[in-house]
Amino acid sequence: MSALASESGAPRYRQLTDTLVREIRSGRFPVGSLLPPEPQLARRFGVSRHTVREAVRRLAGMGLVSRHQGVGTRVLAQVPRARYVASLSSLHDLMQYTQQTRLRRLGEREVEADAELARLLRCPIGQRWIEFDTCRFPEQGELPLVHMRIYVAPEHAGIRDDLAEGSAWIYALVEKHTGQRIAEAEQVVGAISIPAASARVLGVKPRTPGLLARRYYKDTEDRLLSVSINVYPGERFELATRWRLETEPSGE
């Protein structure tokens, strides 16, 4: 039996996904072959069939496998396709996503929120911010996944030194430089025609379809610590969210 690494702290479905990606890439499961059935994978790795099913779903999202009822899960490719799939249902998932990408700082400026920016940031008109212009890349790859503008209060401009390192984890940096613990991250997602500035960074044509995600980081007192405005090209990024029905006890 093969055991998953427990020291990583990542969810078991993510550990299993990463392990199967490595085994497909190494040729253990060649293109055209079938992955072992769910019960066999569950026994081998000591996980539930639910965990196996989620890992296989993620492999399918990467374009590595296809599932066919009555046949099995067939390997389609050794290397994931360019689209990046992020499952963000908790702060832990958001942390994992940022740790699996590389950040590049493109510039910075001090801005005063006009009516449009105040609407996006949910702040008073005239409030001053430091805007860091950045983008993120997958661990392996040179096409940026996202054009990201990060807003922090001017007194926390020292965050720039950490951003320059490239492995920046915004969640942790905001806590470090504000001295406050982030208790909540709210995400608002919608469709967008990619504006020219983001198109230049992402290497796509202006006004092509994309995804706009705004993330608001708040402390335990519900005070706004930082905001990030994220523009994703539609063909490179996919956001996956799962809901699970929680049954109420019958009371009997």
Image (tube, rainbow, N blue to C red):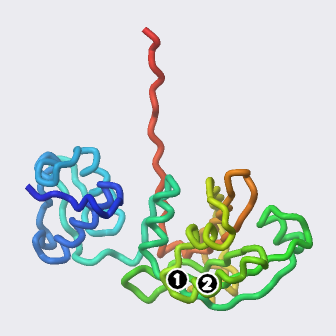
Residue at (12%, 58%) from the top-left corner? 2
Horizontal and vertical percent position of residue 208:
61, 78
Horizontal and vertical percent position of residue 8:
31, 64
| Farthest left residue in view | 1
Secondary structure state at the residue bearing disc 1 = strand
For badge 2, the amino acid type reads Thr
Say which residue label 1 marks: 103
Q: Is residue 209 visible?
A: no
Is 9 placed above or below 246 here?
A: below
Q: Which mark is residue 61?
A: none
Residue at (73%, 81%) from the top-left corner? 131
Residue at (13%, 51%) from the top-left corner? 37
Say which residue label 2 marks: 134
Instruction: State which tag comes first along the sequence, 2 or 1.
Output: 1
Q: Is residue 165 left or right of residue 29?
A: right
Q: Is residue 50 left or right of residue 236?
A: left
Q: Is residue 171 visible?
A: yes
Assess whether mark 1 and mark 2 are in contact (beta carbons under 8 angstroms).
yes
Horizontal and vertical percent position of residue 40:
11, 50
Question: Which sits in the foreground, 176 or 8?
Answer: 176
| Farthest right residue in view | 126
Question: Which sits in the foreground, 56 or 92?
Answer: 92
Q: Is residue 20 left or right of residue 246?
A: left
